[in-house]
């Protein structure tokens, strides 16, 4: 079968022939992939920069099929499958479910599982940039009838945003700032607006102009960070106080620094992005008496909430899906994202270019 991924530890992505996978455990299922989104972590793997690849290098064997934002149909099921999945069911996939036995899994926090990286789609196991994929059944969630395969391929990052919002103390009437206008930032803006935020501001760089235009279209105030523009806009909108909550989706020292500047005293910063934040600005945090919250991955309940938001059309994922391309054009897709063109690109195996 045709697949896209890494065949060697260096920059780039390859299109190659790969054997069709087979179930080897009773709790596994064979998925025929209908759609698979390209994640920011896939882009990091594509770039293969040494400072970002230390963990991946230890776990990845070659060739490795990439892709973990997977939606498809169950074509074969082992005898010990959980969740009631049967052949013909439509399913969307968690990147890495918890082991079920460690301290954090027993706490009901499988997103913090001590062994979750041992079986991660596209890293420790082959992912969804192919026609077929094998996955453990405890990583599956059923796709509601009202949600398309392409939309379901965006549910994994959307559920992560739902988790981040749930980790916050956001309330109706809050002024919200989102650092980073990528897919997750735009999805966070949608949820904030649907939750009754008084204002939603999405901040990005000059190179993010196309994405900031989309932010405006979904009803957020889009601000290109330059000079003090972001701080001035937020202060003007909040009677000089600052934002109640800032979601740092972008990650990195500049985004975090801006987040700490624009949040009000006794406000909250939710950190989602995994960039190097640099030295923590302890003085600002103490003087403003800020709450700093981390948000990692998703919980099973976040998938349920995400599905409900999309099924009810409270949130519409379609504005963030900029391209739907056949798997054969995976290199083009990665080149577009590497140049920060497009927003969310979904690859569709089995469709001719």
Image: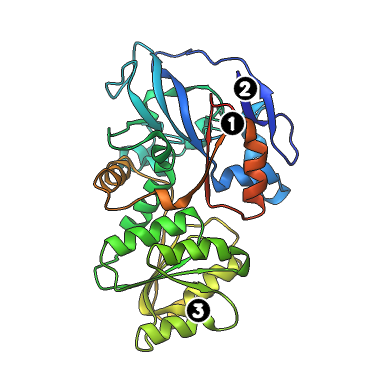
Camera-side residue of 161 and 79 = 161
Residue in the image at 42% along x and 18% along y: 28
Q: Is residue 99 left or right of residue 313?
A: right
Mark nearer the N terminus (2 vs 1): 2
Q: Dot 2: what SS? A: strand
Q: State if disc 1 and disc 2 touch (CB < 8 Å).
A: yes
Q: Dot 1: what SS? A: helix
Could one spot residue 262 in this view of the protein?
yes
Report x, y in % for residue 23.
Answer: 47, 13
Q: Quadrant of residue 91?
A: top left
* Residue beneath disc 1: 327
Vertically, is 314 above or below 102? below
Vertically, is 168 above or below 297? below
Q: CA distance from mark 2 to mark 3?
A: 46 Å
Q: Nearer the viewer, mark 3 or mark 1?
A: 1
Vertically, is 92 above or below 296? above
Q: CA distance from mark 2 to mark 1?
A: 8 Å
Residue in the image at 25% along x and 73% along y: 173
Camera-side residue of 191 and 277 = 191
* Residue beneath disc 2: 2
Q: Nearer the viewer, mark 2 or mark 3?
A: 2
Graded by Cα atoms within 10 Å as few (under 14), some (14 to 19) or many (20 or more), the crowding at tag 2 reads some
In the orientation shown, which residue stands out farthest toward the bottom? 240
Q: Quadrant of residue 81?
A: top left
Q: Quadrant of the C terminus?
A: top right
Residue in the image at 63% along x and 30% along y: 328
Q: CA distance from mark 3 to mark 1?
A: 39 Å
Mark nearer the N terminus (2 vs 3): 2
Q: Dot 3: what SS? A: helix
Q: Give the numbered dot on residue 230.
A: 3
Vertically, is 336 above or below 215? above
């Amino acid at each position: 079968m045709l697949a896209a991924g890494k065949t060697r530890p260096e920059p780039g992505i390859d299109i190659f022939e790969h054997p069709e996978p087979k179930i080897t455990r009773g709790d596994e299922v064979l998925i025929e992939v209908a759609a698979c989104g390209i994640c920011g972590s896939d882009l990091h793997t594509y770039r293969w920069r040494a400072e970002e690849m230390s963990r991946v290098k230890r776990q990845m064997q070659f060739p490795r099929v990439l892709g973990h934002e997977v939606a498809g149909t169950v074509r074969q099921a082992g005898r010990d499958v959980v969740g009631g999945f049967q052949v013909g069911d439509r399913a969307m996939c968690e990147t890495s479910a918890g082991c079920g036995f460690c301290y954090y899994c027993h706490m009901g926090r499988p997103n913090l599982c001590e062994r979750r990286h041992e079986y991660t789609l596209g890293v420790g196991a082959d992912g969804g940039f192919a026609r077929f994929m094998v996955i453990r059944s405890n990583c599956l969630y059923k796709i509601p009838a009202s949600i398309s395969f392409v939309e379901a391929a965006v549910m994994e990052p959307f559920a992560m945003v739902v988790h981040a919002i749930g980790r916050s103390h956001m309330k109706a009437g809050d002024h919200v700032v989102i650092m980073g206008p990528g897919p997750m930032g735009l999805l966070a803006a949608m949820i904030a607006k649907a939750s009754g935020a008084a204002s939603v501001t999405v901040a990005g760089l000059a190179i993010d102009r196309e994405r900031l235009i989309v932010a405006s279209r979904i009803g957020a105030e889009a601000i290109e960070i330059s000079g003090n523009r972001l701080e001035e806009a937020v202060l003007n909108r909040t009677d000089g106080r600052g934002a109640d909550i800032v979601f740092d989706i972008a990650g990195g020292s500049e985004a975090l620094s801006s987040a700490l500047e624009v949040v009000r005293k006794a406000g909250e910063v939710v950190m989602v992005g995994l960039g190097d934040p640099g030295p923590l600005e302890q003085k600002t945090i103490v003087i403003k008496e800020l709450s700093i919250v981390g948000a990692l991955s998703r919980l099973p309940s976040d998938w349920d909430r995400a599905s409900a938001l999309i099924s009810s059309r409270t949130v519409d994922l379609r504005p963030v899906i900029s391209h739907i391309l056949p798997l054969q054009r995976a290199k083009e897709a990665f080149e577009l994202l590497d140049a920060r063109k497009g927003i969310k690109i979904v690859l569709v195996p089995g469709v001719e270019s």
